[in-house]
Image (cartoon, helix red, strand yellow):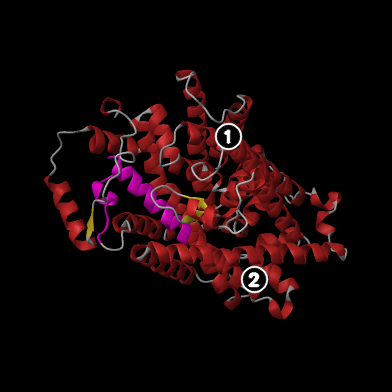
Amino acid sequence: MALLRQGLPWYTGSDTEDTIYACLQVLFCNCQNLSPPPTGNIIGSGIFISPKGVLEHAGSVGFSLIVWVLGGGICALGSLCYAELGVTIPKSGGDYSYVTEIFGGLVGFLLLWSAVWIMYPTTLAVIALTFSNYVLQPAFPNCLPPYIATRLLSTICILLLTWVNCSSVRWATRIQDFFTIGKLLALVLIIIVGMVQICKGHYDALEPQAAFEFIREPSVGQIALAFLQASFAFSGWNFLNYVTEEVVEPRRNLPRAIYISIPLVTLVYTLTNIAYFSSMTPEELLASNAVAVTFGEKLLGMFSWVMPISVALSTFGGINGYLFTSSRLCFSGAREGHLPYLLAMIHLKSCTPIPALLVCCTATIVILCIGETHNLINYVSFINYLSYGVTIAGLLYYRWKKPKLVRPIKVNLLIPISYLVFWAVLLGFSLYSEPVVCGMGLVIMLTGVPIYFIGVQWEDKPRWIYMRVTYLGQKLCYVVFPQNDPSETEPLTEKSDL
């Protein structure tokens, strides 16, 4: 990505241009560990998924818009904390690396375990289901697309993109760059058409009296679930620290980029929801299975086909990006000895982590078959927030444990404390409102405890089965260990800490 910056025709190295470059990285090209291509971003396909869930739990148009604005503010607090961690602990792996460094191997393993088996596969499943719903909705205008059809199309999409990522890193990167256009086209079109509608006087649902007319009285637990739904659209803010190696003078420019980018994302998401309500009543939005398609059918007339195509492009690119990222996290965990070493191997010719990609693909397809979109969002958002809170609590603990450590970025203590207060309230009431959905994720995370002691801590365990499986996997996938850079393979913790 440094080459990208050097290749920009307008880039001369000024402070303003450094900040602009950092903002572009934050919004559209966050780079991940191990490989430089852009894989994730904040402005993502979640905005086409979450509005229905936010409105359903918030209970009114006005309160749902407040949730979107406050959700952006919470992300800003969290991203500032992650910026400090990113420059203080400059190791690949993100949350996993920071938690392992601060709290030791067990806590880091649990976060890795939940990411590999819950967070990434569930997010992939949600985006894949959204892709299939938007593709199929025009063919079923008066009813929901068949269950089997959505699952089958989602599975085909996951398998296709897994094959692409297994074949070539360059192909995966080019797909990501190309399909970003669909996402931007859909959002720009929705906002412009919505603002035109408002200028024409179509804003009945947005007038204060109507906006705060509750469809149902929301409880504190339902409000917490509304924040969980919104957080799915904002997911990606915790990747902001990955740009620190590419940003000139991160101490100055990274906070600037956060102050500019997060409010911009919040504005875009809020305007998108306002645009929806310029043409749809709350009841119509809740009844829609593909909100952007319904919006296009009501306002775009003969050009309504643009909307499902644009959203399908966006979600297709989102699946590709998350596949790339999740496979690299498996790769990183295996390289540190917390996952089977087979997952740290790459194809002999294409240099792609095929075993890690196959694990991500398999876990996603399993979740596709057992979950419904909005329940899956609550499920993954709860575990995401749990991980965020543990990581930011680690920042406070690290301040106490190593007070003299050099910190190029050092946020005010009120920022992590405020985030953790919100975090505790949100998770507590979410667990109270959806004990089965949220509790299931917590249970799956805790199943990693015996796995850690058996798989990582137990050094004298029989290895012949493990070695046979690894050997068979190498032969089937044609993979080998990559050539290691000593600076990248240094263990996250000492042996005694594991």
Most distant residue in the bottom direction? 302
| Residue at the (29%, 29%) spot, across then down | 498
Most distant residue in the right direction? 201
Q: Residues within 10 Å of mark 1 (few under 14, many from 20)?
A: some
Residue 371 visible in the displayed image: no
Characterize the magenta stretch by its predominant secondary structure. helix
Report x, y in % for residue 254. 59, 40
- Mark 1–mark 2 distance (CA, rounded to whole Å): 40 Å
CB-based contact (under 8 Å), mark 1 and mark 2: no
Q: Which quadrant of the structure image shows residue 172?
A: bottom left
Is 338 inside the magenta-drawn segment? yes
The numbered dot on residue 251 is 1
Q: Amino acid at mark 1?
A: Arg
| Residue at the (33%, 30%) spot, across then down | 493
- Say which of 303 and 362 sits in front: 303
N-term-proximal mark, 1 vs 2? 1
The numbered dot on residue 307 is 2
Which region of the structure is painted magenta?
320-348
- Say which of 26 and 290 sits in front: 26
Q: Amino acid at mark 2?
A: Met
Q: Secondary structure at mark 2?
A: helix
Q: Residues within 10 Å of mark 2 (few under 14, many from 20)?
A: many
